[in-house]
Image: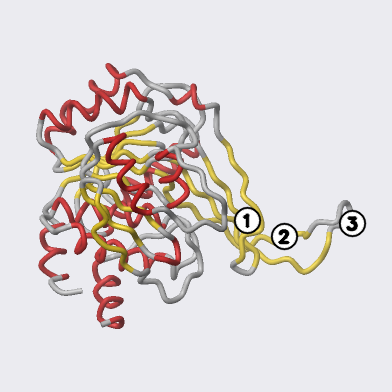
Amino acid sequence: MKGLAPLLRKISRLRILVVGDVMLDHYIWGDATRISPEAPVPVIDIAKDTWSAGGAANVALNIASLGARCSVVGFIGDDEAGAKLTEILHEKKIATLRTPGNATTIVKTRVLVQHQQLCRLDREAPPAAYQITAAQIESLLARAMADCDAVILSDYAKGILTDEVIARITKLAQATGKFIALDPKPRRKIGFHGLDLITPNKRESMQLAGLEISPQTPFPARAVCARLHELYGTKNLVITLGEDGMLLSSNGRIVKTIPTAAREVFDVSGAGDTSLAGLVLALVAGENLETAALFANAAAGVVVGKIGTATVTPAELQAYVARES
């Protein structure tokens, strides 16, 4: 990828606002050498616990790791998990704006045995516990919106991003000329229109388009891109295709499909967050969609070579691109 160093310098001057479902990722690392006498399950001898920011907070971590300044808006509870999540974000100089409420902080606990995930344990309240009004979000975002260069809506279907909240944020962003992007989770249907970028995966793009096909049928890329532009008026669309790379579309027309950059894949956790962060940063820095996708693809290629929710630094990205050139 040409021009990486100048792009990273431009990115270092950007300020990004992330709004969405933040959570704490908890990892329990251990080994299993015996079966429990109480039930036919492995006994895990725990070696260590680690924590990282997950969900929308991981998008923020990726933005900060790539050198831009970042603020994140989401629900962080008044509990031990909330304190841990705040500590992780503030350590990376990410500003936090807490939405109101009395629910528990969302925690995803993954048990890993010899670096293989055995199970995941979720702690979270119902989506209604995390919802806020459009007036509350506008009050929270008034200053942050004025200070940022772009807004990312990171939806994990946990409750923060309702139709009303998305509409209010979109109106604020467009009124102030801010770039606005959404990573949607259409299993909880939400309304949006006129955004600069959306980044669904293949299955999510089909759900958004209201299309169903059999597993044996080839992905109807042209029809999906045209339908999503018709329904949502999105300027840029990037559909992540897993091992098949990324499909790029502008104004309903296919631009290109680029292959995946990953060579070794250990864990895909958080790779979508990395791609989203990379796409937005490169586009806001002035790159075209194809160059932005190549940048995001390379960043995700670094992350999937790590275990657990991870981020990528400029130095890691430059080393990775140099090896692949």
Residue that numbered label 3 is attached to: 37
- What kind of element bears circle 3? loop
What amino acid does circle 1 point to?
Answer: Val
For the image, the number of numbered tags is 3
Task: Pinpoint residue 96: horizontal percent, then vertical percent.
Answer: 30, 37
What amino acid does circle 2 point to?
Answer: Ile
Q: State whether residue 156 is above or below residue 27.
A: above
Q: Which mark sits nearer the N-terminus, 3 or 1? A: 3
Instruction: Using a 10 Å C-alpha cutoff, classify the residue at mark 1 as few (fewer than 14 neighbours), some (14 to 19) or many (20 or more).
Output: many
Task: Pinpoint residue 281: horizontal percent, then vertical percent.
Answer: 20, 54
Residue that numbered label 1 is attached to: 111
Cα distance in 3D space between marks 3 and 2: 13 Å
Residue that numbered label 2 is attached to: 44
What amino acid does circle 3 point to?
Answer: Pro
- What kind of element bears circle 1? strand
Q: Which mark sits nearer the N-terminus, 3 or 2? A: 3
Cα distance in 3D space between marks 2 and 1: 9 Å
Marks 1 and 2: in contact by CB < 8 Å? yes
Figure quadrant of the C terminus = bottom left
Task: Pinpoint residue 3: horizontal percent, then vertical percent.
Answer: 13, 71
Cα distance in 3D space between marks 3 and 1: 20 Å
Residue 64 appears in the figure: no
Instruction: Using a 10 Å C-alpha cutoff, classify the residue at mark 2 as few (fewer than 14 neighbours), some (14 to 19) or many (20 or more).
Output: some
Which residue occupies 31% across, 55% down? 62
Q: Which mark sits nearer the N-terminus, 2 or 1? A: 2
Residue 25 appears in the figure: yes
Which residue occupies 17% across, 41% down? 179
